[in-house]
Image (cartoon, helix red, strand yellow):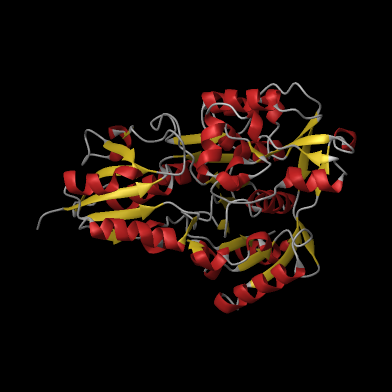
């Protein structure tokens, strides 16, 4: 029987993981191409032979997803595998239609085919949308478990935008490691908070190799924490699964891919940002959770903000710089910087659009609903330069930085600025520590 010829549709993350776990050594299939979407500049390269295995001595080419129909025809593809996340269900089915019209079958791989098992207990933190609050949830979990004397190693959802061979397995324990691995702003936003808290975090391309390295980390490992990205489900089989939901985007937990998978399969569901959402949105979200996962433990939470300097905000015309993916494919209309600007009495929020340069103009063309906020785009050196120049050009009194990293460490900001900080705080009962107490009792009865 002839091998089935496969195109994997992705965005430099789940696509490579699906290949590694299901297709790499599978002689029933031949992967003839990857396609790339969502992330700027990740197409027109190759998944390298060093990572692709013995069946692919020349590696596998990566093309823009816009060429899908032509690729199906030219490469005689039988199957296209959709392998990225945080997109509306409608868009997934539109991709399916494009594939089917071109004559190929459409596939979605699930947890059974792609989740890896660990020798250590695993906690997964996932979400129903990008920007729901996974980072502060993960930080709180690490804090609680480290307080119990446990060594926690975090593994972050992939962001392999550079040299894939060099990025096969990456370990981050110090800020110097960020420079060593030539991290983008998007990567630093996820890794730096863990480093600052004193725990090790891994990432990269080959997530089985990453898992084995983390399990045997030189500083020790008792618990693996899966720090998810977008609204993807975990790459690792969890012993405790936590989903973070966002009442600012109520309904998305049932209408985005794979949001409902995350929501319905989780043991614990956190309703975050209750303090800044309307009561009606929170109540509707609660009903939606109940409709698909009535057995879940539901925790109410907020992510209150504080800043380095209120004086930089109060009465000032401020430029709000927010986490890039949250504003782009995450589709959020506000972030931590906006919340802080409102809380501390900014005179106005300045619209950056008249001052955009270079790659940032393209970002706003692709995501026209971003509005009066500036996403901290930094997938490459040119974007970082354009971000710095846009901030310099913007006619404002000061800059409010809502990104999870110290942006001033990456770019020069020639105006008064202040960082925004936020942590997860539960409201009422149950508390996150109570859930984790049961986890610790189950897996570490000696403590």
The residue furthest left is 1
Q: Position of residue 391 (x, y in %)?
A: 69, 27
Q: Quadrant of residue 418?
A: top right
Q: Which residue is nearer to you in this view: 35 or 435?
A: 35
Q: Give the answer, above or below, for where 334 lies relative to 213.
A: below
Q: Does residue 306 appear to the left or right of 126 in the view shown?
A: right
Q: Quadrant of the N terminus?
A: bottom left
Residue at left offset 80%, top offset 30%: 398
Q: Quadrant of the C terminus?
A: bottom right
Q: Does residue 26 appear to the left or right of 335 in the view shown?
A: left
Q: Give the answer, above or below, for where 88 lies relative to 305.
A: below
Q: Position of residue 2 (x, y in %)?
A: 11, 54
Q: Position of residue 95 (x, y in %)?
A: 35, 56
Q: Is residue 26 visible?
A: yes
Q: Which residue is nearer to you in this view: 186 or 177?
A: 186
Give the tally of numbered discs. 0
Q: Position of residue 283 (x, y in %)?
A: 71, 73
Q: Quadrant of residue 246?
A: bottom right
Residue at left offset 64%, top offset 55%: 132
Q: Which residue is nearer to you in this view: 52 or 224?
A: 52
Residue at left offset 42%, top offset 49%: 14
Q: Give the answer, above or below, for where 406 lies relative to 12.
A: above
Q: Is residue 153 visible?
A: no
Q: Give the answer, above or below, for where 344 lies relative to 397.
A: below
């Amino acid at each position: 029987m002839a091998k089935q010829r496969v195109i994997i549709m992705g965005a430099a993350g789940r696509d490579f993981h699906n290949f590694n776990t299901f297709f790499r050594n599978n002689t029933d299939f031949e992967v003839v191409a990857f396609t790339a979407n969502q992330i700027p500049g990740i197409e027109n390269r190759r998944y390298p032979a060093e990572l692709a295995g013995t069946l692919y001595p020349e590696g596998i080419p990566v093309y823009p997803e816009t060429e899908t129909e032509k690729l199906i025809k030219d490469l005689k593809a039988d199957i296209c595998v959709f392998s990225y996340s945080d997109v509306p269900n409608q868009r997934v089915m539109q991709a399916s239609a494009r594939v089917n019209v071109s004559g190929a079958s459409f596939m979605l791989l699930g947890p059974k085919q792609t989740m890896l098992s660990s020798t250590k207990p695993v906690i997964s933190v996932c979400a129903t949308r990008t920007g729901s609050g996974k980072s502060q949830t993960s930080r709180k979990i690490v804090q609680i478990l480290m307080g119990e004397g446990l060594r926690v190693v975090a593994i972050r959802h992939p962001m392999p935008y550079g040299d894939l061979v060099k990025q096969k397995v990456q370990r981050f324990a110090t800020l110097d490691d960020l420079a060593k691995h030539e991290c983008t702003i998007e990567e630093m936003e996820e890794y730096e908070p863990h480093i600052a808290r004193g725990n090790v975090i891994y990432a990269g391309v080959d997530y089985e190799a990453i898992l084995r390295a983390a399990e045997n980390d030189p500083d020790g490992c008792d618990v693996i924490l899966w720090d998810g990205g977008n609204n993807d489900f975990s790459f690792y089989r969890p012993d405790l699964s936590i989903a973070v939901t966002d009442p600012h985007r109520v309904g998305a937990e049932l209408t985005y891919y794979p949001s409902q998978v995350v929501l319905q399969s989780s043991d614990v569901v956190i309703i975050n940002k209750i303090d800044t959402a309307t009561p009606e949105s929170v109540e509707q979200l609660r009903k939606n959770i109940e409709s698909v996962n009535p057995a879940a433990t539901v925790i109410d939470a907020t992510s209150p903000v504080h800043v380095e300097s209120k004086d930089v905000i109060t009465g000032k015309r401020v430029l709000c710089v927010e986490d890039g993916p949250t504003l782009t494919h995450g589709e959020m209309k506000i972030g931590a910087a906006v919340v802080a600007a409102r809380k501390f009495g900014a005179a106005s929020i300045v619209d950056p659009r008249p001052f955009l340069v270079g790659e940032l103009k393209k970002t706003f063309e692709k995501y026209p609903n971003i509005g009066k906020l500036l996403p901290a785009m930094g997938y490459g050196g040119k974007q970082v330069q354009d971000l710095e120049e846009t901030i310099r050009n913007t006619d404002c009194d000061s800059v409010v930085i809502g990104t999870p990293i110290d942006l001033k460490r990456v770019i020069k900001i020639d105006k008064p600025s202040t960082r925004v900080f936020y942590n997860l705080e539960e409201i009422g009962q149950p508390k996150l520590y109570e859930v984790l107490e049961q986890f610790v009792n189950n897996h570490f009865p000696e403590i």
